[in-house]
Image (cartoon, helix red, strand yellow):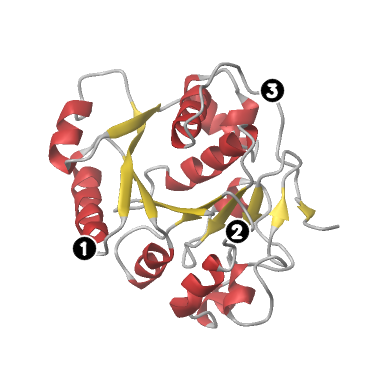
Amino acid sequence: MTRFIGIISGKGGVGKTTTSINLGAALTYFGKNTVVIDANLTTPNIGIHLGVPIVPINLNHVLQGKNTMNEAMYEHPCGTKIIPASISLYDLKKTNPDNLKKHIRSLDNKSDIVLVDCAAGLGREALMALDAVDELLIVTNPELPAITDALKTIKLAEEMKKDIIGVILTKTKENNLDVSINNVQAILEKPVISSIPDSKAVREALTLKDAVVFTHPKSEPAVNYKKLASNLIGKNYEEEMPRGFFSKLFSKKGQ
C-alpha cells in the first residue's frame, strides 16, 4: 500500500521544496519506489531547483484533463520520480486544483511512497493537497513568525484528521538567536524529528541544480536527510550515499 505524505509549511521560503527533493532522493537510496509531486501550482519550484523548469508534460496538463500522471512523470537515473508543475501563468489560469486528490491517489499501489510538496499557507491549493495525503511532515524555521504559521497549519491538519509525523526544522544556526528545539516542540506540541542546518552545501546544491544528498553526501544536511528517510521507513542508516547528480533533463519515464 502506498504511503501518501504531504510536506507542508505555514509560510514560504522555509525549505519545503528542498526537503521534498532531498527526502525523495534519500528514500530512493534506501530502496523505496518514490514519487515527488510539485502540488504548489501557483509558485512551483521543484523543476527550477533541478534545472528543468519547463517539461513537455506537467501536473497542470493532468489537472486540465490532457494527460495522465504517468505521462507527467520524469525519472532520475537513481530511480526517484518527479511530477513537476508548470511555471506558466497561462497554465495556472487554466488549471483547477479541485481534482488534485483524484489524480494523486491514482498512484496508489504504483509506488511505495508519494511525497507531495504542498503550497505554502492555508489557501485553496494547500487545502486540496492536504486532502490528498494521509500523513504530514511540517517544515519550519526556528523563528517565531514561521513557527506561528506552522502552528496554524498543524491545527488545520488536526481538524482534517491527518496523521502528523513530526516537524522538520530547517536553516538552523549555531547561535543563540534561534528558538530552541525544546521551545519549538512546546509551542507546536509535536516532536522535532529532524534538524537541517543552514549550510553552504545546500546553497551550492541549488546552484548545481541538484540534491544536496548527492552533491555533498557527507555534509550534515545530507546525512540528516538520510537519517530522516531511514527513520520514516524503519531502517538503520549505516553508510554514506554514493555521489551522483540530477541530469539537466530527466529521462522520460518508460523511454
Q: Nearer the viewer, mark 2 or mark 1?
A: 2
Image location (x, y in percent) of residue 1 = 54, 54
Of residue 78 and residue 177, the one placed in the foreground of this image is 78
Asked if residue 109 shows in the view, the reply is: yes
How crowded pointer 3 is (Cα within 10 Å; few <14, some 14-19, many 20+) is rated as few
* Drawn side of residue 208 relative to residue 177, left or right: right
Q: Mark 2 or 1 closer to N-term?
A: 2
Image location (x, y in percent) of residue 177 = 21, 25
Residue sitting at x 56%, y 16%: 238
Amino acid, disc 2: Asn
Would you name the residue on which mark 1 appears? 159
Would you name the residue on which mark 2 appears? 109
Asked if residue 180 shows in the view, the reply is: no
Q: Mark 1 or 3 closer to N-term?
A: 1
Mark sitting on residue 139: none
Q: Quadrant of the C terminus?
A: bottom right
Of residue 33 and residue 46, the one placed in the foreground of this image is 33
Q: How many angstroms separate mark 1 from mark 3 (CA)?
A: 41 Å
Amino acid, disc 3: Pro
Q: Is residue 84 above or below residue 65?
A: above
Q: Classify mark 3: helix, strand or loop.
A: loop
